[in-house]
Amino acid sequence: TETEPAAAPRLLLGPPLIRAARPSPDSAAATSDASHPFLDLLDAAFNAPSPAAIKAALKPRRALTENCSATYANSGNPCLDFFFQVVPDTPADRVRQLLAAAWAQDAPTALRLACNLRGVRGTGKSDREGFYAAALWMHEHHPRTLACNVAALAEFGYLKDFPELLFRLLRGPDVRAVAKAGAEADKARRKAKGLATQREGLRARLAGRKRARELALVPAKATFGDFLSAALSKAGKGSKPVESVPVQEPPEVQKPEAMEVDQKKTAAGKPRRMSKKVRTVAKLAMQSLETYYGDRAYRFLFDAVADFFAALLTSDLQQLASGGKKRKIGLAAKWCPTPGSSFDRTTLLCEAIARRLFPRDSDPELTQLSDEHYAYHALHRLRRKVLVPLRKVLELPEVYMSAQRWSELPYTRVASVAMRRYKSLFKKHDEERFDKYLEDVEAGKAKIAAGALLPHEIAAAAYRGQDDNVSELQWRRMVDDLRSKGSLRNCISVCDVSLSMSGTPMEVCIALGVLTSELSEEPWAGKVITFSENPEIHLIKGKTLRQKMDFVRRMHWAGSTNFQGVFDQILRTAVEASLAPEKMIRTVFVYSDMEFCSVGD
């Protein structure tokens, strides 16, 4: 049973630049943390599914497929529908709709399924956006359930999820999608502008060659006399061009002394207007404080997150001290926002964590300070006494990269996602050491992380036709880890590589097909089945991951799958090899976006 976070300081100040407009903490009195049964029920029932909608969700609804075949649109079990229908790229509105129905049927199971959405390292679907949509729905309808389960939710995802949730509550649930769309639009505009510039340059080169030859006779700093001289020289052929007259630069205007002495004030003595960046910081801080003091649910979640980070950092500091075990230090310092970072400017979370780690009564020096000076000193100590030493022990690659200490970077400590993201930078700045590390991994002398990546994410470079050592080694690590578990032994995949699967579905299909083939034992090792009316078992050819991916992508496909033919092929292979029952195929995976033919009798 989850318990509510302990009472914590309620004061938040934000940066000094909003001193004059800072909202008063007294505004929180009207929305105190004291729970009221009526308000809690009202919050839970707001926009909740109606009894008729719940009843409809519990009854399977008939529908038609794209090929007009009879099917069911739902299973009659809302929790099962949520588990099956929520996949990557499912719209947030659809996620909330399915979660609301599942919660109405069985709230504990729905909460577990929401956690399963975020699960990484083999604990769930690793669907970050789907989880964020579910978490924001919980905050709206069951805020205390979300806040009181912060520690449990952290076991499935990672600690950065909580600053991200606070960020989206303040800036809007679709803030990342809007920013991504804006960045892509800017990129497209820059590309179009570059192409237009190239076309104009080409036209100028083609149409202006004659003009360019004429201008070649004119000096760089030309006057009217120079142009006249060039024209006369061209007309007279044998005449010499007039020498150019040097152009005198205008004298530099001396700035008044007042402009040099005081750049911060105008002539009237008034303060200079704040820059756009400073105004943005002030606006974000004001929005954060107004939400914190005015929104009871947000304040409860904010305090729970701050308490959780403070508790983890305190525990890590104890392990860092003499007599502690440094290998038990967690990743709280890695995912805690840095003071002054984007997360901190938007949420003011660092100030809340600093106040919990360094309360006024913890040091006599702090008791004599004003509120603003105390907040400044607490933030300074959070950075210098907590985050810096803990991040140094964690040997985070970002620390070495930002300090340009590439030759000291410990590659064995780089996480799987960071390795995939930074491998080109490692190759650029520290090629010799990085290549030696990859050689050691291949020889078994060192390890490379792969646990937080999905198969198609690791194989992305190979799918694009690139031979990438990092992807190859991470793939081997993933195969070895899964083989040691034995859960996917003796499985076979039916891979649909038709044109309708283009894009991410094709990448996932091929990667999983190659993966299951490498986890199986003889005679199934390295085998996949074609998606066809006449299915065939193929032995994947190739030594590298790129070659294997390319082979599967080029396999023959036709129509839809004949399941009877698939099982006939499996049975024929088993009989020819005289397989024992324990060596038979356990599971047949089918990756397709199409319908299946009737199996028959």
Image: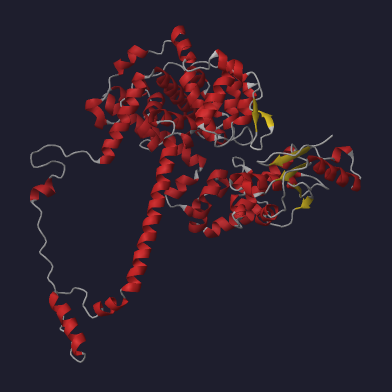
Q: Residue at x 67, y 55 (%)?
A: 550
Write the residue at 55% across / 17% down. Answer: 2
Left or right of 522 on screen, residue 335: left
Between 222 and 536, the residue placed more toward the observer is 536
Residue at 43% over, 25% down: 306
Q: Which residue is nearer to you in this view: 22 or 463?
A: 463
Q: Quadrant of residue 274?
A: top left
Query: Which percent across, then down, holds residue 368?
Result: 27, 23
Who's the residue at 72% across and 57% down the image? 542
Relative vertical location of residue 260 with respect to residue 329 in this rendering, above or below: below
Instruction: Give residue 108's quadrant in the image.
Output: top right
Q: Position of residue 71 (x, y in %)?
A: 68, 29
Q: Is residue 447 visible?
A: no
Q: Is residue 520 above or below residue 26?
A: below
The residue at the far bottom in this view is 238
* Colour theme: secondary structure
The N terminus sits in image quarter:
top right
Vertical comparison of 244 with 588: above or below: below
- Decide if residue 26 is in sight here: yes
Image-quadrant location for residue 347: top left
**397 lies left or right of 563:** left
Q: Looking at this view, is 329 or 104 the one in front?
A: 104
Question: For the C terminus, which image quadrant?
Answer: top right
Q: Position of residue 269 (x, y in %)?
A: 9, 38
* Image-based side of 458 in relation to 302, left or right: right
